[in-house]
Structure formats: C-alpha cells, structure tokens
Image: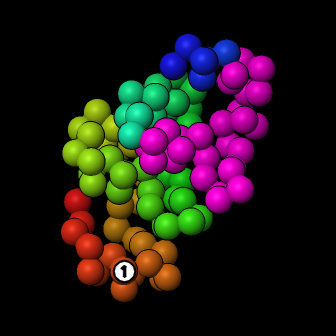
Amino acid sequence: ERLADVLLAFGGKALLESRTVDGDTPLLTALAADNPSLAVHLICSHGADAAVVSKQDGWSALRYACWHNWSDVVSAVMAHDGVCVSVQPQAHRAAAARQMAC
C-alpha cells in the first residue's frame, strides 16, 4: 500500500485510471493478483473507480470480491457511487449463466 501511495503521489488520478495492455486498471490488477487489501486501499484512500469492468474478461471489482468472498472489498465497492450490480455486458451473459453468481 505504501508503494501505491508513492506512485499515486506522482501519477495522480491519471495513473489510477490507466489501463494495462489487457485493459485492466490498477484496481482490477490488484484484485486479479489476490490482493484485496490493496484494492480496498485504492478505492477508499485514492478514489479508484469501483464500477470499472475488465475489458479482458468482463469481470467487475464486485464480481472479483464476491467470487473470492472478500467482504471488505464488497463493502468498499458497494459504498462507491455508480456501481451497477444488475447489468452485465452482452458478450458475457451466456458465460455468466454457466458460472456461479455471487
């Protein structure tokens, strides 16, 4: 978390909203790397967009949190304005129907 603080001090909001080659933000990268404490820190301390959806697999921060049973991340995401929990991208509806929902 301290490294994130230092990087964000220099890169600011632009770094927080940047995307990897695969289209993931730092928040989604933290979740995909099984680092829920960093994800909560990015949301609560730096205002990361909790409504962002991965361009690679269509997963949202909320879906990662539910899948891994990270209640602290679920709470942080649900406290964020603009998070939609009922709509999925069209391309992922069929795949989602075959997977467990949270």
Q: Secondary structure at mark 1?
A: helix
Magenta span of residues: 7-33
Percent of width and height locating residue 23: 65, 58
Quarter containing the C terminus: bottom left
The residue sitting at 22% across, 69% down in the picture is: 100
Percent of width and height locating residue 64: 36, 52
Percent of width and height locating residue 67: 27, 54
**Which residue extends farthest bottom?**
94
The residue sitting at 41% across, 34% down in the picture is: 35
- Specify whether 7 is left or right of 51: right
Please determine whether, in this image, residue 55 is positioned above or below residue 33: below
Percent of width and height locating residue 98: 26, 80
Q: Residues within 10 Å of mark 1 (few under 14, many from 20)?
A: few
The residue sitting at 44% across, 78% down in the picture is: 92
Indicate the quadrant where residue 17 lies: top right
The residue sitting at 77% across, 20% down in the picture is: 10
Give, as a three-letter code, the residue at label 1. Ala
Magenta region includes residue 75? no
Magenta region includes residue 16? yes
Please determine whether, in this image, residue 95 is positioned above or below residue 65: below
Q: Main secondary structure of the magenta part?
A: helix
Residue 67 visible, this angle: yes
Q: How many marks?
A: 1
- Specify whether 48 is left or right of 77: right
Residue 79 visible, this angle: no
Residue ID for mark 1: 95
- Specify whether 20 is left or right of 27: right
